[in-house]
Image: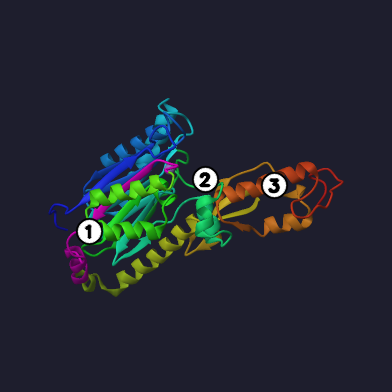
Amino acid sequence: MSSRPYRGWAALTDVGRVRSHNEDSVLAQPPLFVVADGLGGHEAGEVASSIAVQTLLDHAPRRPDAKALARAVRAANREVIRAAREGMGRSGMGTTITAAMVDDGNITIAHVGDSRAYLFSDGRLEQITEDHSMVADMVRRGQITEEESRVHPNRSVITRALGTDPNMVADTYEVEAKPGDILLLCSDGLSGMVDDDTIADILARVADPERAAQALIDAANAAGGHDNISVVLVTVEGTPGSPAAAASRSWLPVIGWVLLAIALVGAIAYGTWRAAQSRYYVADNGGTVAVFRGVPGSFAGLELSWLESESTVPVSALPPAQAARVRATIPVDSLSDGLALIERYREAAQLGIMPDESTPVDAPPGTGSQ
Ligand code: MN
Protein backbone atom coordinates (compact mmCIF):
# COMPACT_ATOMS: atom_id res chain seq x y z
CA MET A 1 0.00 0.00 0.00
CA SER A 2 2.99 2.31 -0.19
CA SER A 3 3.35 4.83 -2.94
CA ARG A 4 7.13 4.72 -3.18
CA PRO A 5 8.43 4.86 -6.71
CA TYR A 6 8.82 1.69 -8.73
CA ARG A 7 12.28 0.24 -8.87
CA GLY A 8 11.73 -0.67 -12.44
CA TRP A 9 9.36 -1.24 -15.24
CA ALA A 10 9.51 -1.13 -19.01
CA ALA A 11 6.92 -1.09 -21.78
CA LEU A 12 8.04 -1.71 -25.35
CA THR A 13 6.25 -2.56 -28.56
CA ASP A 14 7.75 -3.54 -31.90
CA VAL A 15 6.25 -4.04 -35.36
CA GLY A 16 8.09 -7.35 -35.86
CA ARG A 17 9.63 -8.47 -39.15
CA VAL A 18 6.58 -9.35 -41.26
CA ARG A 19 3.78 -6.86 -40.60
CA SER A 20 3.96 -3.37 -42.11
CA HIS A 21 2.32 -1.62 -39.16
CA ASN A 22 1.81 -2.12 -35.44
CA GLU A 23 -1.74 -2.76 -34.18
CA ASP A 24 -0.67 -3.39 -30.56
CA SER A 25 -0.91 -0.73 -27.85
CA VAL A 26 0.90 -0.70 -24.53
CA LEU A 27 0.54 1.49 -21.46
CA ALA A 28 2.67 1.93 -18.35
CA GLN A 29 1.15 4.43 -15.97
CA PRO A 30 1.95 2.97 -12.52
CA PRO A 31 0.15 1.33 -10.90
CA LEU A 32 -1.66 0.51 -14.20
CA PHE A 33 0.02 -1.55 -16.94
CA VAL A 34 -1.72 -2.71 -20.13
CA VAL A 35 -1.08 -4.68 -23.31
CA ALA A 36 -3.73 -4.65 -26.07
CA ASP A 37 -3.45 -6.49 -29.39
CA GLY A 38 -5.72 -4.94 -32.00
CA LEU A 39 -7.62 -7.02 -34.56
CA GLY A 40 -9.15 -6.07 -37.86
CA GLY A 41 -6.26 -4.92 -40.01
CA HIS A 42 -4.81 -1.55 -40.90
CA GLU A 43 -6.73 1.51 -39.64
CA ALA A 44 -8.84 -0.79 -37.47
CA GLY A 45 -6.70 -2.91 -35.13
CA GLU A 46 -4.58 -0.03 -33.86
CA VAL A 47 -7.71 2.13 -33.49
CA ALA A 48 -9.40 -0.54 -31.36
CA SER A 49 -6.36 -1.22 -29.17
CA SER A 50 -5.62 2.47 -28.55
CA ILE A 51 -9.27 3.28 -27.74
CA ALA A 52 -9.29 0.36 -25.30
CA VAL A 53 -6.08 1.45 -23.58
CA GLN A 54 -7.17 5.10 -23.35
CA THR A 55 -10.60 4.17 -21.94
CA LEU A 56 -8.98 1.88 -19.42
CA LEU A 57 -6.67 4.67 -18.29
CA ASP A 58 -9.70 6.96 -17.85
CA HIS A 59 -11.77 4.40 -15.91
CA ALA A 60 -9.23 2.36 -13.94
CA PRO A 61 -9.39 2.54 -10.13
CA ARG A 62 -6.54 4.20 -8.22
CA ARG A 63 -5.58 1.00 -6.41
CA PRO A 64 -5.76 -2.68 -7.33
CA ASP A 65 -9.44 -3.61 -7.27
CA ALA A 66 -10.47 -6.55 -9.44
CA LYS A 67 -14.14 -5.58 -9.77
CA ALA A 68 -13.38 -1.97 -10.59
CA LEU A 69 -10.73 -3.00 -13.11
CA ALA A 70 -13.17 -5.41 -14.76
CA ARG A 71 -15.70 -2.56 -14.95
CA ALA A 72 -13.06 -0.41 -16.67
CA VAL A 73 -12.52 -3.21 -19.22
CA ARG A 74 -16.27 -3.34 -19.86
CA ALA A 75 -16.22 0.43 -20.42
CA ALA A 76 -13.36 -0.07 -22.91
CA ASN A 77 -15.44 -2.75 -24.67
CA ARG A 78 -18.40 -0.38 -25.01
CA GLU A 79 -16.12 2.37 -26.36
CA VAL A 80 -14.63 0.10 -29.06
CA ILE A 81 -18.13 -1.02 -30.11
CA ARG A 82 -19.37 2.59 -30.13
CA ALA A 83 -16.36 3.82 -32.13
CA ALA A 84 -16.93 1.20 -34.83
CA ARG A 85 -20.62 2.09 -34.97
CA GLU A 86 -19.77 5.78 -35.35
CA GLY A 87 -17.38 5.11 -38.23
CA MET A 88 -14.01 5.19 -36.44
CA GLY A 89 -11.77 2.38 -37.56
CA ARG A 90 -13.82 -0.37 -39.15
CA SER A 91 -16.79 -2.40 -38.11
CA GLY A 92 -15.65 -5.77 -36.87
CA MET A 93 -12.51 -4.32 -35.32
CA GLY A 94 -11.59 -5.59 -31.89
CA THR A 95 -8.78 -5.97 -29.43
CA THR A 96 -7.45 -8.18 -26.70
CA ILE A 97 -6.65 -6.61 -23.37
CA THR A 98 -4.48 -7.71 -20.47
CA ALA A 99 -4.46 -5.07 -17.75
CA ALA A 100 -2.62 -5.27 -14.45
CA MET A 101 -2.55 -3.08 -11.37
CA VAL A 102 0.49 -3.55 -9.19
CA ASP A 103 0.70 -2.24 -5.62
CA ASP A 104 3.52 -3.73 -3.62
CA GLY A 105 2.97 -7.49 -3.78
CA ASN A 106 -0.71 -7.21 -4.69
CA ILE A 107 -1.33 -7.73 -8.39
CA THR A 108 -4.81 -7.49 -9.88
CA ILE A 109 -5.40 -8.48 -13.49
CA ALA A 110 -8.34 -8.17 -15.87
CA HIS A 111 -8.02 -10.09 -19.10
CA VAL A 112 -9.77 -10.79 -22.41
CA GLY A 113 -8.24 -12.55 -25.44
CA ASP A 114 -4.89 -14.20 -26.08
CA SER A 115 -2.42 -11.67 -24.75
CA ARG A 116 -0.88 -12.97 -21.55
CA ALA A 117 0.24 -12.17 -18.01
CA TYR A 118 3.05 -14.21 -16.48
CA LEU A 119 4.75 -14.08 -13.09
CA PHE A 120 8.48 -14.77 -12.92
CA SER A 121 9.29 -15.84 -9.36
CA ASP A 122 12.27 -17.79 -7.96
CA GLY A 123 13.53 -18.49 -11.47
CA ARG A 124 10.22 -19.98 -12.58
CA LEU A 125 7.85 -18.52 -15.14
CA GLU A 126 4.15 -19.13 -14.56
CA GLN A 127 1.35 -18.09 -16.88
CA ILE A 128 -1.34 -16.33 -14.84
CA THR A 129 -4.00 -15.74 -17.48
CA GLU A 130 -5.84 -18.31 -19.55
CA ASP A 131 -6.01 -17.57 -23.27
CA HIS A 132 -9.43 -17.08 -24.80
CA SER A 133 -8.50 -18.82 -28.03
CA MET A 134 -9.55 -21.80 -30.11
CA VAL A 135 -6.17 -23.53 -29.68
CA ALA A 136 -6.19 -22.96 -25.90
CA ASP A 137 -9.62 -24.67 -25.79
CA MET A 138 -8.13 -27.55 -27.78
CA VAL A 139 -5.14 -27.82 -25.42
CA ARG A 140 -7.51 -27.85 -22.42
CA ARG A 141 -9.50 -30.66 -24.06
CA GLY A 142 -6.26 -32.58 -24.65
CA GLN A 143 -6.71 -32.55 -28.44
CA ILE A 144 -3.37 -30.87 -29.14
CA THR A 145 -0.26 -30.07 -27.10
CA GLU A 146 1.00 -26.64 -26.12
CA GLU A 147 3.77 -27.05 -28.71
CA GLU A 148 1.30 -27.96 -31.46
CA SER A 149 -0.83 -24.94 -30.57
CA ARG A 150 2.05 -22.63 -31.57
CA VAL A 151 1.98 -23.80 -35.20
CA HIS A 152 -1.73 -24.67 -35.50
CA PRO A 153 -3.40 -22.99 -38.52
CA ASN A 154 -6.13 -21.59 -36.23
CA ARG A 155 -3.73 -20.33 -33.58
CA SER A 156 -4.84 -16.71 -34.00
CA VAL A 157 -8.58 -17.41 -33.67
CA ILE A 158 -9.68 -15.89 -30.38
CA THR A 159 -12.93 -16.72 -28.64
CA ARG A 160 -13.33 -13.52 -26.63
CA ALA A 161 -12.33 -9.95 -27.49
CA LEU A 162 -13.32 -6.37 -26.90
CA GLY A 163 -15.44 -4.82 -29.65
CA THR A 164 -18.02 -7.47 -30.50
CA ASP A 165 -20.20 -8.61 -27.60
CA PRO A 166 -21.77 -5.84 -25.46
CA ASN A 167 -22.17 -8.41 -22.66
CA MET A 168 -18.53 -9.49 -22.72
CA VAL A 169 -17.10 -10.49 -19.35
CA ALA A 170 -13.43 -10.08 -18.41
CA ASP A 171 -11.59 -12.72 -16.42
CA THR A 172 -9.95 -11.34 -13.29
CA TYR A 173 -7.03 -12.65 -11.27
CA GLU A 174 -5.54 -11.61 -7.93
CA VAL A 175 -1.97 -12.64 -7.31
CA GLU A 176 0.30 -12.21 -4.29
CA ALA A 177 3.88 -11.66 -5.36
CA LYS A 178 7.15 -11.21 -3.50
CA PRO A 179 9.52 -8.28 -3.79
CA GLY A 180 11.80 -8.96 -6.73
CA ASP A 181 9.23 -11.03 -8.63
CA ILE A 182 8.64 -9.81 -12.19
CA LEU A 183 5.25 -9.39 -13.83
CA LEU A 184 5.31 -9.85 -17.61
CA LEU A 185 2.47 -8.78 -19.89
CA CYS A 186 2.84 -9.59 -23.58
CA SER A 187 1.01 -9.94 -26.86
CA ASP A 188 1.06 -13.22 -28.80
CA GLY A 189 3.85 -11.78 -30.96
CA LEU A 190 6.11 -12.78 -28.04
CA SER A 191 4.40 -15.86 -26.56
CA GLY A 192 3.67 -17.32 -30.01
CA MET A 193 7.29 -16.99 -31.16
CA VAL A 194 9.34 -17.60 -28.00
CA ASP A 195 8.71 -20.53 -25.67
CA ASP A 196 8.33 -20.10 -21.91
CA ASP A 197 11.76 -21.59 -21.10
CA THR A 198 13.52 -19.07 -23.33
CA ILE A 199 11.51 -16.21 -21.81
CA ALA A 200 12.48 -17.43 -18.32
CA ASP A 201 16.16 -17.66 -19.33
CA ILE A 202 16.14 -14.06 -20.52
CA LEU A 203 14.39 -12.79 -17.38
CA ALA A 204 16.88 -14.69 -15.20
CA ARG A 205 19.87 -13.34 -17.12
CA VAL A 206 18.92 -9.68 -17.70
CA ALA A 207 18.05 -7.75 -14.53
CA ASP A 208 17.30 -4.34 -16.00
CA PRO A 209 13.63 -4.23 -17.13
CA GLU A 210 14.28 -2.04 -20.16
CA ARG A 211 17.09 -4.29 -21.42
CA ALA A 212 15.17 -7.46 -20.60
CA ALA A 213 12.12 -6.20 -22.53
CA GLN A 214 14.35 -5.41 -25.52
CA ALA A 215 16.00 -8.85 -25.26
CA LEU A 216 12.55 -10.52 -25.36
CA ILE A 217 11.60 -8.51 -28.46
CA ASP A 218 14.94 -9.39 -30.07
CA ALA A 219 14.27 -13.08 -29.37
CA ALA A 220 10.81 -12.89 -30.98
CA ASN A 221 12.30 -11.17 -34.03
CA ALA A 222 15.14 -13.71 -34.21
CA ALA A 223 12.47 -16.43 -34.28
CA GLY A 224 10.82 -14.75 -37.26
CA GLY A 225 8.91 -11.78 -35.83
CA HIS A 226 5.70 -12.91 -37.53
CA ASP A 227 3.50 -10.55 -35.51
CA ASN A 228 3.65 -7.29 -33.60
CA ILE A 229 5.50 -7.82 -30.30
CA SER A 230 4.55 -6.04 -27.06
CA VAL A 231 6.27 -6.53 -23.73
CA VAL A 232 5.57 -4.91 -20.36
CA LEU A 233 7.80 -5.82 -17.40
CA VAL A 234 7.17 -4.69 -13.83
CA THR A 235 9.46 -5.46 -10.92
CA VAL A 236 7.40 -6.06 -7.78
CA GLU A 237 8.20 -3.73 -4.88
CA GLY A 238 7.59 -3.79 -1.13
CA THR A 239 6.13 -6.58 0.94
CA PRO A 240 3.01 -8.72 0.65
CA GLY A 241 0.43 -8.63 3.46
CA SER A 242 -1.18 -5.21 3.34
CA PRO A 243 -2.65 -3.16 6.22
CA ALA A 244 -6.08 -3.82 4.69
CA ALA A 245 -5.69 -7.57 5.35
CA ALA A 246 -4.79 -6.90 9.00
CA ALA A 247 -7.79 -4.59 9.38
CA SER A 248 -10.17 -7.19 8.02
CA ARG A 249 -8.95 -9.69 10.64
CA SER A 250 -9.82 -7.26 13.47
CA TRP A 251 -13.39 -6.53 12.36
CA LEU A 252 -14.22 -10.10 11.48
CA PRO A 253 -15.19 -11.25 15.03
CA VAL A 254 -17.40 -8.16 15.43
CA ILE A 255 -19.74 -8.98 12.57
CA GLY A 256 -19.94 -12.54 13.85
CA TRP A 257 -20.15 -15.97 12.37
CA VAL A 258 -23.76 -15.69 11.19
CA LEU A 259 -22.92 -12.88 8.83
CA LEU A 260 -19.82 -14.74 7.73
CA ALA A 261 -21.90 -17.82 6.93
CA ILE A 262 -24.32 -15.70 4.88
CA ALA A 263 -21.39 -14.14 3.05
CA LEU A 264 -19.91 -17.57 2.43
CA VAL A 265 -23.12 -18.95 0.90
CA GLY A 266 -23.30 -15.81 -1.23
CA ALA A 267 -19.68 -16.27 -2.31
CA ILE A 268 -20.26 -19.91 -3.24
CA ALA A 269 -23.38 -18.99 -5.20
CA TYR A 270 -21.47 -16.19 -6.89
CA GLY A 271 -18.54 -18.49 -7.63
CA THR A 272 -20.89 -21.06 -9.13
CA TRP A 273 -22.57 -18.33 -11.13
CA ARG A 274 -19.19 -17.10 -12.39
CA ALA A 275 -18.12 -20.65 -13.29
CA ALA A 276 -21.41 -21.17 -15.13
CA GLN A 277 -20.74 -18.01 -17.17
CA SER A 278 -17.90 -19.68 -19.01
CA ARG A 279 -19.79 -22.85 -19.94
CA TYR A 280 -22.02 -23.54 -22.90
CA TYR A 281 -24.50 -26.13 -24.03
CA VAL A 282 -26.75 -26.83 -27.00
CA ALA A 283 -30.40 -27.52 -26.19
CA ASP A 284 -34.02 -27.33 -27.28
CA ASN A 285 -35.30 -23.76 -27.01
CA GLY A 286 -39.05 -24.09 -27.44
CA GLY A 287 -38.76 -26.23 -30.56
CA THR A 288 -35.55 -24.93 -32.18
CA VAL A 289 -31.91 -25.74 -31.51
CA ALA A 290 -30.08 -23.02 -29.55
CA VAL A 291 -26.82 -22.36 -27.73
CA PHE A 292 -27.10 -21.48 -24.05
CA ARG A 293 -24.41 -20.10 -21.80
CA GLY A 294 -24.21 -21.58 -18.30
CA VAL A 295 -25.43 -24.88 -16.94
CA PRO A 296 -28.96 -26.29 -17.11
CA GLY A 297 -30.99 -25.87 -13.92
CA SER A 298 -30.42 -23.53 -11.00
CA PHE A 299 -28.33 -23.28 -7.85
CA ALA A 300 -29.40 -21.63 -4.54
CA GLY A 301 -32.29 -20.02 -6.38
CA LEU A 302 -30.00 -18.60 -9.07
CA GLU A 303 -30.84 -19.20 -12.70
CA LEU A 304 -27.57 -20.40 -14.20
CA SER A 305 -28.23 -20.36 -17.90
CA TRP A 306 -28.76 -17.68 -20.50
CA LEU A 307 -29.91 -18.02 -24.09
CA GLU A 308 -26.82 -17.10 -26.10
CA SER A 309 -27.77 -17.76 -29.70
CA GLU A 310 -31.03 -18.90 -31.29
CA SER A 311 -31.33 -20.75 -34.59
CA THR A 312 -34.06 -21.66 -37.06
CA VAL A 313 -33.18 -25.36 -37.02
CA PRO A 314 -36.23 -27.26 -35.70
CA VAL A 315 -35.44 -29.99 -33.18
CA SER A 316 -38.19 -32.03 -34.87
CA ALA A 317 -36.20 -32.00 -38.15
CA LEU A 318 -33.53 -34.13 -36.47
CA PRO A 319 -33.75 -37.93 -36.37
CA PRO A 320 -35.09 -39.23 -33.03
CA ALA A 321 -31.67 -40.05 -31.57
CA GLN A 322 -30.24 -36.60 -32.35
CA ALA A 323 -33.39 -34.85 -31.20
CA ALA A 324 -33.28 -36.74 -27.91
CA ARG A 325 -29.66 -35.75 -27.43
CA VAL A 326 -30.47 -32.07 -28.00
CA ARG A 327 -33.43 -32.28 -25.59
CA ALA A 328 -31.12 -33.82 -22.97
CA THR A 329 -28.68 -30.89 -23.61
CA ILE A 330 -25.24 -31.28 -25.20
CA PRO A 331 -22.34 -29.60 -23.37
CA VAL A 332 -19.91 -27.74 -25.66
CA ASP A 333 -16.67 -25.96 -24.83
CA SER A 334 -17.42 -22.59 -26.31
CA LEU A 335 -20.00 -20.51 -28.09
CA SER A 336 -18.18 -21.08 -31.39
CA ASP A 337 -18.29 -24.86 -30.84
CA GLY A 338 -22.04 -24.61 -30.17
CA LEU A 339 -22.61 -22.52 -33.30
CA ALA A 340 -20.52 -24.97 -35.33
CA LEU A 341 -22.63 -27.87 -34.07
CA ILE A 342 -25.83 -26.05 -35.04
CA GLU A 343 -24.38 -25.34 -38.49
CA ARG A 344 -23.69 -29.06 -38.92
CA TYR A 345 -27.27 -29.80 -37.88
CA ARG A 346 -28.59 -27.19 -40.31
CA GLU A 347 -26.55 -28.45 -43.28
CA ALA A 348 -27.38 -32.03 -42.44
CA ALA A 349 -31.09 -31.22 -42.07
CA GLN A 350 -31.04 -29.53 -45.49
CA LEU A 351 -29.20 -32.43 -47.08
CA GLY A 352 -31.42 -34.93 -45.35
CA ILE A 353 -28.54 -36.63 -43.53
CA MET A 354 -27.20 -36.25 -40.03
CA PRO A 355 -23.60 -35.70 -38.94
CA ASP A 356 -21.78 -38.84 -37.86
CA GLU A 357 -24.77 -40.94 -38.93
CA SER A 358 -25.20 -40.99 -42.70
CA THR A 359 -28.78 -42.16 -42.34
CA PRO A 360 -30.85 -40.76 -45.20
CA VAL A 361 -34.10 -39.15 -44.15
CA ASP A 362 -36.71 -39.58 -46.85
CA ALA A 363 -39.44 -37.56 -45.21
CA PRO A 364 -39.10 -33.77 -45.49
CA PRO A 365 -37.71 -31.99 -42.42
CA GLY A 366 -40.33 -31.41 -39.75
CA THR A 367 -42.35 -34.54 -40.45
CA GLY A 368 -39.70 -37.21 -40.02
CA SER A 369 -39.68 -37.63 -36.26
CA GLN A 370 -41.90 -37.22 -33.28
MN1 MN B 1 -0.92 -10.37 -32.19
- Residue at the extreme top: 87
| Residue at the image position 24 percent from the left and 52 percent from the top | 209
The picture quadrant for ligand 1 comes to: top left
Q: Is residue 122 above or below residue 315?
A: below
What range is drawn magenta here?
225-250
Could you tell which of marks 1 and 2 lies nearer the N-terminus? 2
- Closest to the observer: 26 or 298? 26
The residues bearing labels 2 and 3 have C-alpha atoms spaced at a distance of: 20 Å
Residue 71, relative to residue 91: is it above or below? below
Q: Distance between the residues labelled 1 and 2?
A: 32 Å
From the image, tell me which residue sits under label 3. Answer: 344
Say whether residue 301 is left or right of residue 15.
Answer: right
SS at badge 2: loop
First in sequence: mark 2 or mark 3?
A: 2
Query: Between tags 2 and 3, which lies in front?
Result: 2
Contact flag, marks 1 and 3 (Cβ < 8 Å)? no
- Residue denoted by label 1: 236
Residue 67 pos. (x, y %): 32, 53
What percent of the width, then of the height, locates residue 233? 27, 51
Which residue is found at the position 16% from the left and 54% from the top? 7
Identify the amino acid type marked 3: Arg
Tell me the amino acid under the disc marked 1: Val
Residue with the most extreme right position: 362
Depth check: 247 or 69 in front?
Answer: 69
Q: Quadrant of the N terminus?
A: bottom left
Q: How crowded is mark 3: few (under 14 residues within 10 Å), some or many (20 or more)?
A: some
Residue that badge 2 annotates: 157
Residue 172, image quadrant: bottom left
**Seen in the image, is 244 located left or right of residue 156?**
left
Which is nearer the eye, 122 or 31? Answer: 122
Q: Disc 2 marks which amino acid?
A: Val
Asked whether residue 214 is drawn in magenta, I would say: no
